Amino acid sequence: ATPTSIMVGTGRAAQLGVLFRQGDALQSLQCVKTVALDKTGTLTKGKPELTDLVLMDDLTEDEVLLLIGAVEARSEHPIAQAILRRAEAAGPVPGEVSDFQSHTGFGVSATVLGRKVTLGADRLMIRDGIDLGDTGRIASEMAKAGKTPLYAALDGKLAAVIAVADPIKPGTPEAIAGLHDLGLDVAMITGDNRGTADAIAAQLGIDRVVAEVLPDGKVAAIDKLKEGGNRIAFVGDGINDAPALAQADVGLAIGTGTDVAIEAADVVLMSGDLRGVVNAIDVSQRSMANIR
Ligand code: ADP
Ligand code: MG
């Protein structure tokens, strides 16, 4: 590629809100065969809402909400905000919280008003030996609807199955279709539940799903997609996406995401709209074709 064609390409991309931090990303992007995307905050808004709460014990909905809200008040996870918002609507959230622990990729736990509260994915309950009884059907129904099922336990006993749903961003379906039109394979990488991830992928027509990935497992997921010399672009927004953004052949960060992700990326999408990914690849393919 000539310096002029790269300059013209990066200039055209900038007009479309796509910032190439280095000129060589414009060249590597045209060789990409698979675009892998983080789910939460990238394909979806990253602002989940609590949608279901199924009680398993003799506590009331408000009692459960206040206990779990007290724990989530200490967590930074988007799920925590969804639960805390609902808890605050139920009454004053207890401030008496001790032994708070964030189990990265699993959930949270703490002692609230003398009771041990455990909240998170099924794998957290399994790890702590909490009996899930026959809640499998409830959880899989939630997952089939694209919602994330969570479990809440009090003193080691299951108290509720909860669902949170994170809406898909408006530009996402068109972006996935656009990537397919460019002849690319689309993959999703997420820490979320397998059933939930599959449901959202099916809804969007995503070709491959890597689910239940622990935060430090995203790099390994990229390596797996790279097998056979396949060139990969990865799109993400979060702190835990930074290593994967660096590991991919081209890393694209959502400009509205965290600074750590932006620093690790080769390309920044100024708006949160994923149609920017299609524009980036389109500009790259066109400007490289022009100079041959
Ligand atoms: P992702 O952001 O891709 O969903 P994470 O690794 O952050 O991945 O979280 C994986 C799973 O762990 C979540 O889907 C959820 O089930 C559980 N989890 C993590 N943090 C919390 C929290 N603060 N409250 C409840 N569940 C949580
Ligand atoms: Mg994310």
Image (tube, helix red, strand yellow):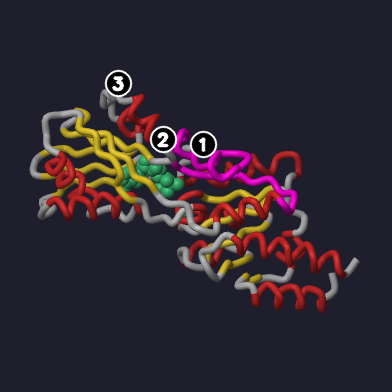
Query: Label 3: how many residues lie within 10 Å, few (<14), some (14-19) or many (20+)?
Result: few
Classify residue 239 as left or right of residue 9.
left
Q: Quadrant of ligand 1?
A: top left
Q: Earlier in the sequence, mark 1 or mark 2?
A: 2
Q: From this view, report whether residue 277 is shown above or below residue 122.
A: below
Please say whether residue 186 is one of the residues in the magenta stretch.
yes
Residue 261 position in % (x across, y down): 51, 62
Q: According to the image, label 1 marks what residue?
A: 198
> Judging from the image, what secondary structure is the residue with disc 1 in?
helix
Instruction: Place residue 143 in its image quadrant.
Output: top left
> Judging from the image, what secondary structure is the residue with disc 3 in?
loop
Q: Amino acid at mark 3?
A: Asp
Q: According to the image, label 2 marks what residue?
A: 143
Query: Label 2: how many residues lie within 10 Å, few (<14), some (14-19) or many (20+)?
Result: many
Q: Residue at x 68, y 72 (%)?
A: 13
Residue 227 in view: yes
Q: Earlier in the sequence, mark 1 or mark 3?
A: 3
Q: Residue at x 33, y 34 (%)?
A: 124
- Disc 2 to disc 3, C-alpha distance: 16 Å
Q: Which mark is residue 134?
A: 3
- Disc 1 to disc 3, C-alpha distance: 22 Å
> Which sits in the foreground, 278 or 99?
278
> Which sits in the foreground, 57 or 253?
57
Q: From this view, report whether residue 246 is shown above or below residue 286.
A: above
Q: From this view, report whether residue 170 is shown above or below residue 128.
A: below
Classify residue 51 as left or right of residue 216.
left
The reply to whether dot 1 and dot 2 touch (C-beta < 8 Å) is yes
Q: Quadrant of the C terminus?
A: bottom right
> Which sits in the foreground, 118 or 101?
118
Q: Amino acid at mark 2?
A: Ala
Question: Which residues, given as a range, are shown in magenta?
Answer: 181-210
Q: Quadrant of the N terminus?
A: bottom right
